[in-house]
Image (spheres, helix red, strand yellow):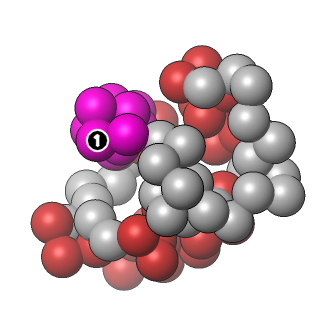
Amino acid sequence: METLIEILKEIRPDVDYENCTTLIDEHILNSLAIISLIAELEDEFDITIPTVEIAPKNFNSAKAMWELITRLQEEDE
């Protein structure tokens, strides 16, 4: 999770990622940030994020992103 928070802070350092649950809903992360984030997550965690998973519920919070990453890593095993 620490690595995820570091990646997020590179994109928007001014956000409290540990407590924010509306990253998409309140447009804290815009579409360009999401595209960049997906590429970073795929590289860092050796996962592929399917298009169907690119939904607000999976990106509204760091916790939701971490759950997505963990789930995708488990599916790859």
Between 48 and 20, the residue placed more toward the observer is: 20
> Residue placed at 28% from the left, 41% from the top?
31
Q: Quadrant of residue 22?
A: bottom right
62, above or below 32, in the image? below
Which residue is pictured at 70% across the width and 22% down the height?
A: 13
Residue 35 inside the magenta-drawn segment? yes
Magenta span: helix, strand or loop, mainly? helix
Q: Is residue 3 above or below residue 58?
A: above
Instruction: Label 1, secondary structure: give it.
Output: helix
Residue 54 location (% of width, % of height) = 28, 65
The magenta stretch is: 30-40
Q: Quadrant of the C terminus?
A: bottom left
- Residue at image coords 66%, 57%: 62
Residue 32: percent from left, percent from top: 28, 32
Tell me if I can see residue 19 in this picture: yes
Residue 65 shows in this picture: no
Amino acid type indicated by mark 1: Ser
Residue at position x 34%, y 54% in the image? 47
Q: What number of labels is visible? A: 1
Tell me if 74 is positioned left or right of 17 in this view.
left
Rendering quarter of residue 19: bottom right
Furthest residue in direction front, as rendered: 26
Q: Which residue is mark 1?
A: 31
Q: Going by the image, does 47 lie left or right of 26?
A: left
Q: Position of residue 66 (x, y in %)?
A: 61, 63
Mark 1 is surrounded, within 10 Å at the Cα level, by few (under 14), some (14 to 19) or many (20 or more) other residues, namely few
Does 46 sit left or right of 60 as displayed? Answer: left
Viewer-closest of 33 and 3: 33
The relative height of residue 68 versus residue 27 in the rendered view (above or below) is below
